[in-house]
Amino acid sequence: MHLPEVHAPDSPAQRGRDLARWRRAFNASLAAVLLLAVAFAAQGAFDAAAWTVRPGRPDGLVGLLTAPLLHGSVAHLASNGFALLVLGTVAGAQVPRALAGTLPLAWLGGGLAAWALGTPGSHHLGASGVASGLVFMLLTLGLLRRDRPSVAAAMLALVLFGGALLGVLPREPGVSWQSHLGGAVAGVLAAWLLRAADPQPPRVRYSWEDEVDEDDTPAIEPVRAEAVRIAPARRGDGG
């Protein structure tokens, strides 16, 4: 059996295209995080509570569009901003079409779950529902597609943001697990619907998959009938 062939590295042109793809994804994710920072800096100029998701109230539905832009503290903003920067960069570079379809679903899904399941009188804000949707989208795509980029992205999401798996449960007071749950459901749904939206990379085929070494598979020759001797039956002593 031949050892797998050593394939030549990517061409400079291909490496340039890959680098440009990652750079675009990083820049877009960074722009989104900067937008969140600008919105947080401007919150002192208006009544931010009026733009949050307020469960059960018709006027609280406006928060479906605006609540992910608002944050309660610098630490809250930093946590969500880091998650969006990393997850947005990875998803934008590996599965950009799935990312584009997941963002609106996770944006609205997190808000709808908070509005429907949240405690009356509470206020829900922050982009954690969107981040949860991206985590679950990457994990689900890794299971469904099983190509190397999708599996690598899923493993990275699991290692860095595995806590999102438990974030959909009511564990910590003051944390909107409802938004996390809505974003997670939206992420899984988006991954299922968009699992084939991004083309899979070509699979590398090795020489040993197509070639058979004769030394390892000896030929079996048919046996001629006249070459087979049949021993005479022995007569037993008993009846």
Image (spheres, rainbow, N blue to C red):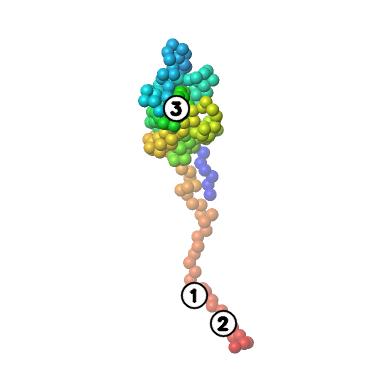
The kind of residue tagged 2 is Ala
Could you tell me which secondary element the residue under label 2 belongs to? loop
Amino acid marked by disc 1: Glu
Of residue 119 and residue 29, the one placed in the foreground of this image is 119
Q: Nearer the viewer, mark 1 or mark 3?
A: 3
> Measured from the top left, where is residue 225 in percent x and y?
48, 73
Q: Secondary structure at mark 3?
A: loop
Image location (x, y in percent) of residue 238: 62, 87
* Quarter of the image where one finds residue 215: bottom right
Residue that mark 1 sits on = 226
Mark 2 or 1: in front is 2
Q: Crowding near pointer 2: few (<14 within 10 Å), some, many (20+)?
A: few
Question: Gap between marks 1 and 3, in whole Å?
Answer: 93 Å
Read off the residue under disc 3: 120
Mark 1: secondary structure: helix
In the foreground, 77 or 28: 77
Q: Is residue 13 visible?
A: no
